[in-house]
Image: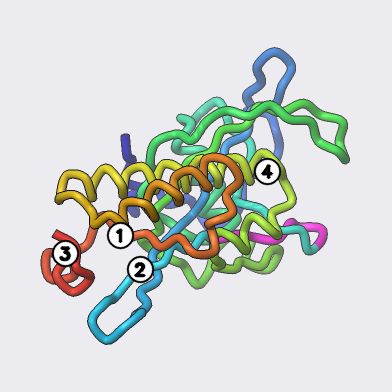
Amino acid sequence: MVTLVSQENVVALVSRTGRDLQRYSKGRRLVVGCIPYRYKTTKQTSLEAVRELEVLLISSQKGNAMLFPKGGWELDESKTEAASRETLEEAGVQGIIEGELGQWNFKSKTRDTDYEGYMFPLHVQQQLDSWPEKHLRRRIWMSVQEAREVCQHVWMKEALDEFVSRLTSEQHADKEQVGPCSTRKSENCSKATTEVGISGSCFASLKFYDPNLTPNEKLETGRN
C-alpha cells in the first residue's frame, strides 16, 4: 500500500504543539515516523548508470544526535497522515508513503516514558527550502551504512534494516521475473540477501535500482 501525499495535505509552516490530542495505548505514547529516501544516480562505467539509495536523517532539537523524523500520532489523523506531517515538520520533505515497516516498543532514556512506535518508508518527491523546524534541526542525506552508524535509536536502526531487506527482496524478485542471473551474479545476490538478513554488513556495497525508472532509463542501466 502506498499513500501519495498531495499539496492539499500540506500543513502550515508551524509545528503542532501540545499533547491534548495525543494517542496512547496501554499507557504507551503512540509515535510514528518515516525513513525518507531517494535514489542518487551514479555511473560506475561509461555504459552503466546505477542509482544508489540514500536516506535522510535529522538532528535532534537539543543536540547533535541523528535520527529519522518521528513524533506523536494524534486523534484527528490517520497513522500515515501523522507520519507525513511529522516528516514535513521536522525534515521538510514530502513524497509517497509506502507500507508500514513494523511496530516497536521502547522506553525513553531521558523522560522515563514508554512508547509504541511505527515506521514507514517515504519516497521523497519534493524537498522544501522552508519548513517548520528549519532553524531547529539539520537534515543530511547519507548512505544506508552511514545512517546505521550515526542513528541514535536502536529501534530506528531495526526499521532501516527491515526497509533495506524489503528493497533487496523486491529487487531480487524483479530480477527473477526478467530472467536468471549468471552463476556469478546469482551467488552475489544470494550473499547480499544473507548478509542483509543477518548483520547488514553489505550495506556499503549494495546498490538499488529505482523501481520507477522510465523505459529509456531502464535501457541505460541495463534493466528490462
Residues 103 and 61: in front is: 103
The residue beneath circle 2 is 51
Q: Quadrant of the C terminus?
A: bottom left
Residue 194 part of the magenta segment: no
Q: In which image quadrant can residue 94 be found?
A: bottom left
Q: Secondary structure at mark 3?
A: loop
Q: Does residue 158 lie above or below 13 as drawn?
A: above
Callout in the foreground (2, 4): 2
Q: Does residue 29 lie above or below 53 as drawn?
A: above
The tag earlier along the polypeptide, 1 or 2, is 2
The answer to whether the residues at label 3 and label 1 have Cβ atoms under 8 Å apart is: no
The tag earlier along the polypeptide, 1 or 4, is 4
The tag earlier along the polypeptide, 2 or 3, is 2
The residue beneath circle 3 is 214
Q: CA distance from mark 3 to mark 1?
A: 10 Å
Callout in the foreground (2, 3): 2
| Part of the protein shown in magenta | 56-63
Residue at left 56%, top 67%? 142
The answer to whether the residues at label 1 and label 2 have Cβ atoms under 8 Å apart is: yes
Residues 104 and 4: in front is: 104
Q: CA distance from mark 3 to mark 4?
A: 42 Å
The residue beneath circle 1 is 210
Is 130 situated left or right of 220 in this image?
right
| Label 2, residues with CA under 10 Å away: few <14, some 14-19, many ≥20 | some
- Hey, what amino acid is under mark 1? Asp
